[in-house]
């Protein structure tokens, strides 16, 4: 299958060709025609499936056919839970929209609001935003939604987890009733379905089955290890692989401590978590992408939506409390068809979490050492 059969315009196909992608991923193959049909879409797809291009490409086409944005107004709104994801979605808009005559902006908290006020003044066709900052900007009369045609909730499950539901409800009251809605979520829990019920009208449902992605494309292994020996084990693993490794730690403090420990063993490492400023996070991510550091240590929330291509190894230094987070975490490896490895360090105290994860992924994770 190629991109040419999906109904995209020549100019969009040119920008896709420029990225080097030739085959649409399953979510793209299903979401692109669905969005182009003008109906609402509810898609179960996690990061790593190519979902961003799955909504950005058809949105650019839908918006391109109509009038341009009026001053101070937005025609499409894409809400994301984190700044990093917002920045990445915007980057996709710039990449795929480079041949379109559409304007875009990205706004999120933690940075100076003035340039964002300025960016919105002339009006934008596509606005990517985190909910809190968007409401701030609305209150400051920087943007209105009277002409809004399209609403996207990206990683809706994470938005609920992070407590954005009140902000989302507020935003829904500010936008026109008549619009196209797209909802993307790693899973469709009861809560997500409830939210979808208040947002979407007869949505086309798409499921690219994240469980299959996890189970089939990613080799999952575990080590039973005592808490005090985790750091040593990680140093050994990292030194053995020579590959770049994304490590998940449970706490910010734990992440920082681990970076120090890795440094003492001459391993280049940095941490990304919510106590870091936006500038620090961007720099760390950039260094990691450029292969200037070997190990990135992240907490769940900070790691959400980080877009790193073809990450070979993910280590769960601590198991996540919510089993669903395990799937999000290991989704960072083996993305878009490449194979990946996920290694979990499990202490006796984490046995219960392990069982919950195994029952969610419906398989036992192979153990690399003897159980204690
Ligand atoms: P996403 O799930 O949107 O975060 O995308 C995951 C990764 O897959 C990104 O790094 C994209 O650049 C990449 N990607 C998107 N579409 C394709 C495609 N059709 N073929 C190969 N890789 C892709």
Image (cartoon, rainbow, N blue to C red):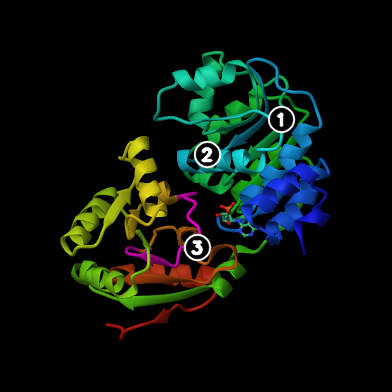
- Asked whether 317 falls inside the magenta stretch, the response is yes
- Note whether 155 is above or below 212 in the view shown: above
Q: Quadrant of residue 350?
A: bottom left
* Residue density around tag 2, few if under 14, some if 14–19, many if 20 or more, within 10 Å: many
Cα–Cα span, label 2 and label 3:
20 Å
Q: Secondary structure at mark 1?
A: loop
Query: On the rendered structure, is 166 left or right of 296?
Result: right
Ligand 1, image quadrant it occupies: bottom right
Q: Give the mark nearer the N terminus: 2 vs 3.
A: 2
Which contiguous range is marked in magenta? 304-318
The one of 349 and 29 positioned closer to us in this rendering:
29
Residue 101, which numbered label? 1
Q: Position of residue 281 (x, y in %)?
A: 36, 42
Cα–Cα span, label 3 and label 1:
32 Å
**Which residue is tagged 3?**
310
- Note whether 364 is above or below 97 in the view shown: below
Q: Give the mark nearer the N terminus: 1 vs 2.
A: 2
State the predominant SS element of the stretch in magenta. loop
């Amino acid at each position: 299958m190629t991109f040419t059969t999906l109904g995209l315009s020549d100019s969009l196909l040119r920008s896709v060709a420029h990225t080097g992608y030739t085959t649409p991923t399953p979510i793209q193959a299903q979401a692109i025609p669905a969005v182009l049909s003008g109906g609402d879409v509810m898609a179960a797809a996690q990061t790593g499936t190519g979902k961003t291009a799955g909504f950005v490409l058809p949105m650019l086409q839908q918006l391109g056919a109509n009038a341009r944005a009026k001053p101070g107004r937005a025609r499409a709104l894409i809400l994301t839970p984190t700044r990093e994801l917002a920045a990445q979605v915007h980057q996709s808009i710039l990449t795929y929209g480079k041949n379109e005559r559409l304007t875009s902006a990205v706004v999120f908290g933690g940075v100076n609001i003035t340039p964002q006020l300025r960016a919105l003044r002339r009006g934008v066709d596509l606005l990517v935003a985190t909910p809190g900052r968007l409401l701030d900007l609305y209150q400051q009369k920087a943007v209105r939604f009277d002409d809004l045609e399209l609403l996207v909730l990206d990683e809706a499950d994470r938005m609920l987890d992070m407590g954005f539901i009140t902000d989302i409800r507020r935003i829904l009251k500010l936008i026109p009733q008549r619009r196209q809605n797209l909802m993307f979520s790693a899973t469709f829990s009861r809560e997500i379905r409830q939210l979808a019920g208040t947002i979407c009208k007869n949505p086309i449902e798409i499921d690219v089955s994240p469980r299959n992605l996890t189970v089939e494309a990613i080799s999952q292994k575990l080590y039973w290890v005592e808490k005090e020996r985790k750091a040593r084990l990680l140093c050994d693993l990292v030194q053995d692989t020579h590959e770049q490794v994304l490590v998940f730690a449970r706490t910010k403090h734990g992440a920082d401590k681990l970076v120090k420990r890795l440094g003492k063993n001459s391993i280049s490492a940095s941490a990304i978590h919510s106590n870091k400023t936006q500038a620090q996070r961007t720099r760390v991510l950039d260094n990691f992408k450029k292969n200037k550091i070997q190990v990135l240590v992240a907490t769940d929330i900070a790691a959400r939506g980080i877009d790193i291509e073809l990450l070979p190894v993910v280590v769960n230094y601590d198991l996540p409390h919510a089993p669903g987070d395990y799937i999000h975490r290991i989704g960072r490896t083996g993305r878009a068809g490449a194979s990946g490895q996920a290694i979990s360090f499990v202490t006796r105290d984490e046995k219960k979490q392990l069982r919950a994860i195994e029952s969610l992924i419906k398989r036992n994770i192979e153990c690399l050492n003897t159980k204690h």
